[in-house]
């Protein structure tokens, strides 16, 4: 498209990105060749394909940590994903990385979660233990390469190698034999700072932990000091909002204050340097220690809360039962999953079908076929 008013992707990236960012014109491309788009970069198209996929839309019906039975305030897998994308882009922009790739990776990162979060994942892993198990990170690749359809001439979304290999390093850190791009590292860092903060928020709101208990955490003490410097006389709700924002803000600041100077002094001139280095973008120093302690607290007091254990146990037993029901009688499976039995076997196809369900659809299926 010869239109001088429009800036090309190359021009834009040359003007904005650091030498160690992933430039679109260095992409290894897609498995099935496609013409380039006149005004969207490879990674913008990936992002759009992800947003328009059925699996992405279903994230709104999948629990992050808390189920739909617990009200409608807390995060779903979709809102978590959007928070990750937002924080990852903030860091990526400040570090002059490729925001389009970051956004695509962030929106994609949890797309493989089955119903009922990690409880669902563990149950499916047991159901499929003789078939190689189940992991949500691996299933995201199955969705992108096999289950979604975008074009009649090839299966999957035909995403770029960079998005697929970024996801592959979530499955296996040694995947591809090279280190992840900085764009993938930023998403990884954003994911953990996002869930730390929003799980505290949701747990407080649901009354699973008290503010006093949260205040005992060193990371929270750091945040409270920062809040006191910035504002006083906050009402209880404003205070919790400030606390959660400050948790994210101090982690982002910590990452940028450390990664920024490191990258500026790295001498790296291309992604080849990134690919060979074991440097990782993340929180460092005292804050990293307090973050670890915070995650221990969340694990013990929130993720292992009796309310959540109850949900977890029910979900796991129901997933086992529905899985066995479909394996014994695959007749109710949609046509494409019946067809898929010939390719991946009965158990894997049943697992893939269940993994794609939202929490609510799973419950409907359970009621319909188990009772
Ligand atoms: Mg996540």
Image (cartoon, helix red, strand yellow):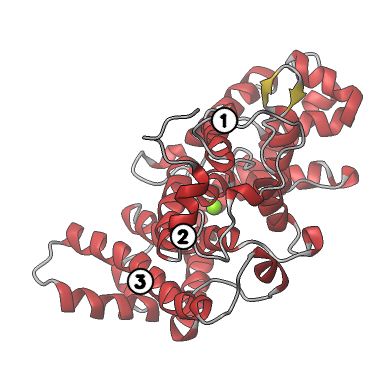
User: How far apart are the alpha carbons under marks 2 and 3?
Assistant: 30 Å
Q: Nearer the viewer, mark 3 or mark 1?
A: 1
Mark 3 is surrounded, within 10 Å at the Cα level, by few (under 14), some (14 to 19) or many (20 or more) other residues, namely some
Q: Nearer the viewer, residue 127 or 176?
A: 176
Residue 333 in the image: above or below residue 256? above
| Residue ID at (32%, 75%) | 215
Q: Identify the mark nearer the N-term, 2 or 3.
A: 2
Q: Which residue is mark 1?
A: 37
Mark 2 is surrounded, within 10 Å at the Cα level, by few (under 14), some (14 to 19) or many (20 or more) other residues, namely many
| Residue ID at (40%, 51%) | 86
User: How far apart are the alpha carbons under marks 1 and 2?
Assistant: 24 Å
305 on left or right of 204: right
Which label is found at residue 214?
3
Q: Identify the mark nearer the N-term, 1 or 2.
A: 1
| Residue ID at (65%, 64%) | 271
Q: Nearer the viewer, residue 241 or 40?
A: 40
The spot of residue 72 in percent (x, y) is 36, 39
Q: Which residue is mark 2?
A: 92
Picture quadrant where residue 239 is located:
bottom left
Q: Nearer the viewer, residue 292 or 282?
A: 282
Query: Could you tell me which quadrant the C terminus lies in?
Result: top right
Residue 228 in the image: above or below residue 149? below
Q: Identify the mark nearer the N-term, 3 or 1.
A: 1
The spot of residue 27 in percent (x, y) is 66, 48
Q: Can the viewer see residue 243? A: yes
Say if disc 1 is inside 8 Å of ligand 1: no
User: How far apart are the alpha carbons under marks 3 and 1?
Assistant: 49 Å
**Secondary structure of the residue carrying numbered label 2:** helix
């Amino acid at each position: 498209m010869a239109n001088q008013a429009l800036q090309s992707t190359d021009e834009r990236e040359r003007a904005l990105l650091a030498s160690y960012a992933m430039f679109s014109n260095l992409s290894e491309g897609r498995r099935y060749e496609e013409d380039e788009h006149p005004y969207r970069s490879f990674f913008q198209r990936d992002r759009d394909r992800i947003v328009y996929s059925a699996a992405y839309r279903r994230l709104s019906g999948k629990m992050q940590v808390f189920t739909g039975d617990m009200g409608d305030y807390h995060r779903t897998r979709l809102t978590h994903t959007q928070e990750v994308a937002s924080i990852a882009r903030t860091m990526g922009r400040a570090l002059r990385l490729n925001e389009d790739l970051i956004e695509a990776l962030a929106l994609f990162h949890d797309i493989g979660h089955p119903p009922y979060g990690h409880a669902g994942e563990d149950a499916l892993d047991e159901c499929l233990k003789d078939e190689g198990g189940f992991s949500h990170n691996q299933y995201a690749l199955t969705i992108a390469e096999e289950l979604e359809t975008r074009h009649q001439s090839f299966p999957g979304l035909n995403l770029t190698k960079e998005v697929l290999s970024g996801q592959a390093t979530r499955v296996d850190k040694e995947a591809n034999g090279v280190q992840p791009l900085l764009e993938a590292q930023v998403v990884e860092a954003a994911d953990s700072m996002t869930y730390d903060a929003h799980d505290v928020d949701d747990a407080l709101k649901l009354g699973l932990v008290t503010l006093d208990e949260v205040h005992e955490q060193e990371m929270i003490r750091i945040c409270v000091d920062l809040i006191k410097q910035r504002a006083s006389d906050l009402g209880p709700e404003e205070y919790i909002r400030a606390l959660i924002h400050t948790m994210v803000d101090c982690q982002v600041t910590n990452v940028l204050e450390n990664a920024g100077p490191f990258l500026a002094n790295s001498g790296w001139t291309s992604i080849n340097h990134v690919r060979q280095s074991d440097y990782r973008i993340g929180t460092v120093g005292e804050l990293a220690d307090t973050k670890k302690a915070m995650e221990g607290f969340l694990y013990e007091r929130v993720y292992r809360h009796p309310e959540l254990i109850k949900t977890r146990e029910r979900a796991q037993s129901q997933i086992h039962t529905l899985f066995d029901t479909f394996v014994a009688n695959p007749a109710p499976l949609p046509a494409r999953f019946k067809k898929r039995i010939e390719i991946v076997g009965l158990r894997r196809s049943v697992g893939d079908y269940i993994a794609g369900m939202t929490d609510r659809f799973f419950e409907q299926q359970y009621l319909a076929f188990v009772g």
